[in-house]
Amino acid sequence: MVAFRSTDASGRTTGLLFRCVLYSLIALALIIVDKRYAHLVKIRQFLSVVAYPVQVAVASPFEGWHWFRDNVTTRDALRADKTKLEAELRVAQFRLQRYEALEAETQRLRALRDNTAGVTDRFVIGDIMNVDLDAFRERVLVDKGAGDGVYVGQAVLDSGGVFGQVARVGQLTSEVILVSDAAHAIPVQINRNGLRTVAVGTGDTNRLKLPYLPTSADVVAGDLLVTSGLGGGFPAGYPVGTIAEVKRDPAQSLADVDVKPAAALDRSRELLFVWLKPQAAELPPPAKPAPVTKK
Amino acid sequence: MMRDTRIRRMPMALSALVALALAILPLPAVLDAFRPDFLVLVVFYWCIESPRAGGLSLAFFAGLALDVIQGVVLGQHALALTLMGAWATHLRLRIRVFSMLSQCLVVFMLLTGYQFIVFWVDGATGNPVTNFSRWLAPIIGALLWPVLISFMGKLHER
């Protein structure tokens, strides 16, 4: 190991090996502690605050450009926008007419079953910060953090449907993992027939897949997938995507199903953080089995 | 000697900060996979140029900053940058007299080693990225090395 102790121009040894080993051991310890235990959450929250100015500095020119573009528009463009939005609003209001009644009915039916799990309680809107995280993971940074009550595992929606869930929370910011991330899976059901399965991300922003459906499953292209609310992470009934393609190979036992996500994963700028209603009544604990008496 | 050390701290910190900003600068998705590891190149530069000013400490803390900002396991980039920074420091006297082509090759090797450690920690912590395009970054980084040298040389000569 003597060869590694390089001497400087002044003839003094720099202790390169010592420092290299020291720093590497610290780094390895960090990796292990961060992976295995939750002790580093607070430290990471603090560090994310330190990183915040850099992220803001990078994002702000783009924010400024968006602001500029929003403000400098022609009268004609604004008029066209207005007409379009009015048309959209008319359609939306038409669809909403029966919403209140249906919502009340749903609540009543759910109450009958003592099941209010997966009903949304309130929303907070967060803006995606214009910074790139890891190029090979589908994640975004959003400007709402622990200070706003955001928690890990929280469901995140956009105007089209389910966007993802919170992967990590900082004091001022949080990281959202998209439904299309290769490490993400979400419990879904097919709206047409209630068939339950799991939608898994592929790492490709415009594609999810359903890897656990048998070849004989009743699924056709164009079917709407909604969240099933199982697992308790996501509210039930929100659109996740539509079936794009179903490939059935008779030799395989599982079908190959591609899904097009409902949320505008690569275009949205505003996201909704969703809080679920707390469980109304905890289920009574299961009755204790009678003690086995030995004779 | 002390004066020497103090003078070089400022451009060091400044260049590292700029490189960190470049690492998270939003790029179109197509270009994103081709983004070179700016911060890693800057760290290598300082390890080779003036190791006495704390190149290895810079490597460790720059790595930590990358971990926090990219939201990966804490210590992953720190480990990779420390090891490769130490190697760059060890080779620095030789690298300085190399021709530009050989320098690029050495930097390519260091960058590949860096990617490999990151890749390995990814796998060991259970979220592997099997995307092949991550191995493009070292090639682009090595091609960028001459540009970086001439730019950084101008930066701290002033």
Image (cartoon, coloured by chain):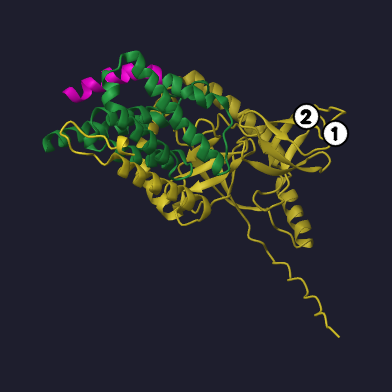
Chain colours: A yellow, B green
In the image, the segment drawn in magenta is B142-158
Coordinates of residue B134 in the picture (x, y in percent): 51, 27
Which residue is more in the foreground, B130 or A192? Answer: B130
Q: Earlier in the sequence, mark 1 or mark 2?
A: 1
Q: With A245 as the anchor, is A216 left or right in this view? A: right
What amino acid is at disc 2? Gly
> Which secondary structure is most common in the magenta stretch?
helix
State the separation of the CA atoms marked 1 and 2.
Answer: 17 Å
Residue A56 tag number: none
Q: Is residue B81 visible?
A: yes
Q: Is residue A204 above or below residue A105?
A: above
Residue B99 included in the magenta stretch of the image: no
Q: Chain of mark 1?
A: A
Q: Which residue is mark 2?
A: A222
What amino acid is at disc 1? Thr
Instruction: Tell me the quarter of the picture where residue B97 sits.
Output: top left
Coordinates of residue A154 in the picture (x, y in percent): 58, 49
Which residue is the extreme one toward the bottom?
A295
Q: With A113 as the anchor, is A50 left or right in this view? A: left
Residue A215 tag number: 1
Coordinates of residue A120 in the picture (x, y in percent): 64, 52
Q: Secondary structure at mark 2?
A: loop
Instruction: Tell me the quarter of the picture where residue A68 sits.
Output: top left
